[in-house]
Image: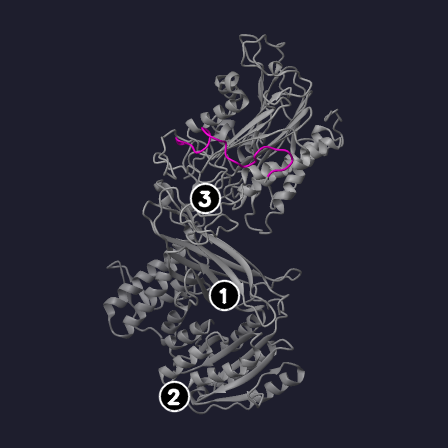
Amino acid sequence: MSSDLPEFSIRVDQNPYLPAGGREMHAIIGIEARGAPGRTAGEGAAAPEASTAEAAEIIIIDSSGSMSYSGKMAAAKRAAKAAVNVLRDGVHFAVVAGANQPRMIYPQGQRLVRVDARTRRAALSALSTLDAAGGTAIGSWLRLAGRLFADHSGAVRHAILLTDGKNQHESDAELDAALAACSGVFVCDARGVGTDWNVAELRKISSALLGSFLDVPDPADLEADFREMTAAAMGKRVADVVLRVWTPRDAKLRFLKQMVPTVEDLTGRRSGTGQIGDYPVGAWGDEEREYHLCVEVPAGDIGRQMRAAWVKVIAPGSADTAERELAMGNVLAEWTDDEAKSTRINNRVAHHTGQSELAEAIQEGLEARRSGDEERATARLGRAVALAGQVGNAQIAELLDRVVEYDHETGTHRLRKDVSKADEMSLDTRSVRTVRTAQRTGTASGAGGATADEGHPGTRATRPTQQREPRDHQGEG
Amino acid sequence: MDGAGTGPGGDAEPAGEGIATSCPACGEPLDPSDRFCEACGRSRAGPRAVIEIPEIRPEAVLETSSRRVRPAPPAECADCGATGIDRDGYCERCGLRQPTGNEHVEIELAGPARDGPVRAAGVSDLGRRRSRNEDALAMAALPRTVCAVVCDGVASAPGSDQAAQVAADTGTVGLADLLVAGYDAVAATRGAIQRAGGAVAELSDTRHNPPACTYVSAVVSQESVTVGWVGDSRAYWIGAPAGNNGHGGSALLTRDDSWADLMIARRAMSEEAARSDPRAHLLTGWLGADAETSAPHTVTFRPRGPGMVVICSDGLWNHLPEPSELESALREAPLAEGGLLAAARGLVQAALDAGGHDNVTVVLIPFPPISPTSGPASARPAEWASPAPAPTPVPCPPSPDPPFPPPPGPDGASREPSHE
């Protein structure tokens, strides 16, 4: 690796102005990684441009007895084969079957092997013999993966976990201990197939291991999903990236949340003490993510300008290379007595604040619904409908519509009666999936004001958005 | 710090002009312990720099003018006293942004006689509403020619204050360089803009909203005045008063690269409608990595009498857009007592009095410029505010319509004896 590092850039969106006595500063940190110079980035669903970074991939397939129903095992095998076919030559890999204990499907010994024509063929053939029997002990599967990755610490380490059931054959404590042991060792994307698995459990796993998780109600959809997931993993160029956040003395970092592509609270992941904290953000290919940072700073005098946070993207060092700063951005604070400035709310901060609240409202609403608290469920999910509209998250609005309905007589929302398990799980799972900007028209400009004339792309605003003020020559405000 | 035989670059003027006892913006008396004005909130921002740049070698301009406006970062945080101040000027402990020292800058370009009149004077001020001065100015003298540049950083792009300073410095050095090399004023003006644009583009490799600035330059020789610009910083010609009654002829020499001027040029809107549109101030031209490469605008003319060249940022002309307004303001300025610098201060003060929404920067260059052969101090030209006998009343603005856009390429331009 190393020469293949993507080019990182940071963009900070904030209103840096605080009123007298103001202490809370919010900012949206947008981080973009683009292919190394001389490469062209892959687009959308197409496979990303092949990375040349050293990579290791483990595919973990649930082989518990329940997998034999509804064609799940057959679909899982097809999906695993599809994933094996997407692996780049030269990548180290293994296929593991999970039941009460994990079992090596390929290779036979507890190690990873390099992908070439022979090993690929052998893995595909080994997958054909996979049978479903036994229970589910996900922690033990992850621990095996952790051991297999141990010899590949310089590589981009990624696992795919597929399960169809609850983690019944080990205790919560065992799973938690396994997650603690594997955290930072590899990134894991988790998939739940069917409707018998536990959303909170998979959320916990993928969150601890910095991966995505998704429901796949129909086994037939697994294959495409695995192919896409593996291709994305193959596109990663740098592993173990860290966000390093400096805050001023006597300031407090209130929270740091990933907001795009999904809501993920990183606040508790901090390592380091004092003014500098490191937050792990996993492996990066060509992609963009956004983070919501909130810092509480000591109140300053009117006119005082300060750096409220300094955010850096850090690539880890290795035995022979030092860690590198890949990008940095400033979050500023300035106290003003001009209320027009201090009361302005940054559009992106507002957007992401709404999406955080949306995810919470859905999860709380569904939790209340499960526990029979219909009143609270109705209130929270009704709130979620309003928020989904407000932030323009059409996908979540559609999923919500399958769980709550609008009662035109009373003008309120009510819970639908016959909600399918799959729809409920889908809403729960996808509650953390965000949209970068509102998915509707007519919201892009508005409050903040466009910074350039749409009809004349070759123009440039001469004033910072935050500093505009109504005046004779500039009527906007 | 010292070099090139210049004055105490970057140092504070001693007594009186040192630590201000009253707010430079609003005049409110300041307590010695105040860091910010109680009345208007403006940072006291340390002493203002009044620097004299005598005749210098072109290669020394960059060093001199940069050092003046960007003194070395303070060793200790102005607030918490910590010693770690990073390159961006933030305290590594408490995060305070340290004063940059360019909140109020005054520069005089010294004349050939030590106590004689100066060749040019410029003032740049934070204004009343901004927290940073993102305007910049630089000037240089050849034996018989004065060069000056004013730039205005695009405040919506981070790093634009640096862009403005780099453009002003590079442009001024470029002008001096090219004139010495024998290029005529128009070719030198174009070349200097090109160099300045290149220097700004190199500041950042970000593709999103890179640092950017406007640019206006003036080359004032014994025979001619040449201005060049990109963006909405302006140049004016203010003719010396003709006799007791009248105007010496004043004109705006530049046409803004702005949305309003584009609409007016296309006859898409009336001037009044275009100027009052919220988009009026959007730039259609600027220096920066994302700037379109187009021939910069230049205008050159031979005044038929003495006068004054004024180059300024929009912080000044927003308040005094008409040449006649500028002329009146200059005439009210105490030119006779305080000289050019006082006149420049007077113009900046007029903008501050009118609201001072933006950074304000102005440079005044008399025509013809003071040169070693222009005689003793008493014979200073452009004594246009004095009751001295007026020169022949020759209104001498350039051709009323500056070429817009200008003819491409410097090749066809006539070569004039530009650097004698």
Hey, what amino acid is under mark 1?
Answer: Val
Which contiguous range is marked in magenta? B2-23
Q: Are marks 3 and 1 on the same chain?
A: yes
Chain ID of residue with mark 2: A
Q: Nearer the viewer, residue B22 or A340?
A: B22
Q: Mark 1 vs mark 2: which is more N-terminal?
A: 2
Task: Tell me, yes or no, whether the highlighted magenta stretch contains residue B10.
Answer: yes
The location of residue B81, given as percent across then percent down, is: 42, 49
What secondary structure is found at the residue carrying circle 3? helix
Please tell me the numbered disc located at residue A242.
1
Q: Nearer the viewer, residue B284 or B172?
A: B172
Can you tell which of label 1 and label 2 is closer to the viewer? Answer: 1
| Label 1, residues with CA under 10 Å away: few <14, some 14-19, many ≥20 | some
Q: Are marks 2 and 3 on the same chain?
A: yes
Q: Residue at x 33, y 73 (%)?
A: A419
The quadrant of the image that shows the C terminus of chain A is top left
Horizontally, is A116 left or right of B10 in the view? right
What secondary structure is found at the residue carrying circle 1? strand
The answer to whether any part of residue A338 appears in the image is: yes
Horizontally, is B392 left or right of A460 in the view? right
State the CA–CA distance, disc 1 to disc 2.
Answer: 34 Å
The location of residue B272, given as percent across then percent down, is: 49, 27
What secondary structure is found at the residue carrying circle 2? loop
Above/below status of B400 relative to A477: above
Hey, what amino acid is under mark 2?
Answer: His
Q: Residue at x 65, y 62 (%)?
A: A39
Helix, strand or loop for the magenta stretch, by majority: loop
| Residue under label 2 | A169
Please tell me the numbered disc located at residue A465.
3
